[in-house]
Amino acid sequence: SQTIHQWPATLVQPVGSPLSLECTVEGTSNPNLYWYRQAAGRGLQLLFYSIGIDQISSEVPQNLSASRPQDRQFILSSKKLLLSDSGFYLCAWSGQSSSYEQYFGPGTRLTVT
Amino acid sequence: GENVEQHPSTLSVQEGDSAVIKCTYSDSASNYFPWYKQELGKGPQLIIDIRSNVGEKKDQRIAVTLNKTAKHFSLHITETQPEDSAVYFCAASRYSSASKIIFGSGTRLSIRP
């Protein structure tokens, strides 16, 4: 069966520091991968999606970037965090054959201080 | 682009009663409508979905209905139980090679004992 992992689970970082969040998927090949952000008490905002290695689309211009160095690894990064980057970051995957069904990871709670 | 509106934002029902959450969408080309349940501090979990060629789908105590003409869809939970307490998100998507799901703003459902 497929599983999706995210780490770290929680992170507290000062303003201006760099960020690296990692997401990996097991049990499937060539998944579509997604990064979402969820502000406190709010819905999910799609940040990036990827249909393959080095194929990444950005949905919202911002302080963040994404990379996909391996088929089942998706990384969310920032060079300098802003206070507004605080939130709950969720990675999701979908299969190529049923790309409309997305499955989410456990999330990373980021607090920028 | 697609816009999904969800109501109500909060809902409190007596244990054993039914709960109904409603959503509307704007893009008539959307053809996939998932519902997610998110428990506190966790990632959203896909609980049921419906495609545009179906008007209703049921899975035990939960059911979804879709009215394509009116562009609205609903989640129905019968015989509610304490473990149904969570935030529920509706979403809409147009099938593509990497479907971008647009989420509603969420409904916080509380089950009163």
Image (tube, grey):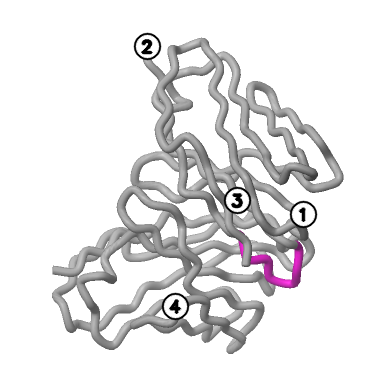
What is the quadrant of residue B83 in the picture?
top left
State the separation of the CA atoms marked 2 and 1.
Answer: 37 Å
Give the residue at mark 3.
B91
State the separation of the CA atoms marked 4 and 2.
Answer: 42 Å
> Given this view, does label 3 or label 2 mark the residue nearer the observer?
3
Instruction: Mark 3 or mark 2: name the one nearer the start of the chain.
Output: 3
Report the number of numbered marks: 4
Q: What span is in magenta?
A: B95-101
Give the residue at mark 2.
B113
A54 above or below A12?
below
Give the residue at mark 1.
B31
Disc 3: host chain: B
State the separation of the CA atoms marked 4 and 1.
Answer: 30 Å
The residue under label 3 is which amino acid type? Ala
State the separation of the CA atoms marked 4 and 3.
Answer: 25 Å
Asked if the magenta segment contains residue A75, the reply would be no
Q: Are marks 1 and 3 in contact (CB under 8 Å)?
A: no
Residue at horizontal 52 percent and vertical 76 percent from the top: A59
Neighbours of disc 1 within 10 Å: few (<14), some (14-19), many (20+): some
> Given this view, does label 2 or label 1 mark the residue nearer the observer?
1
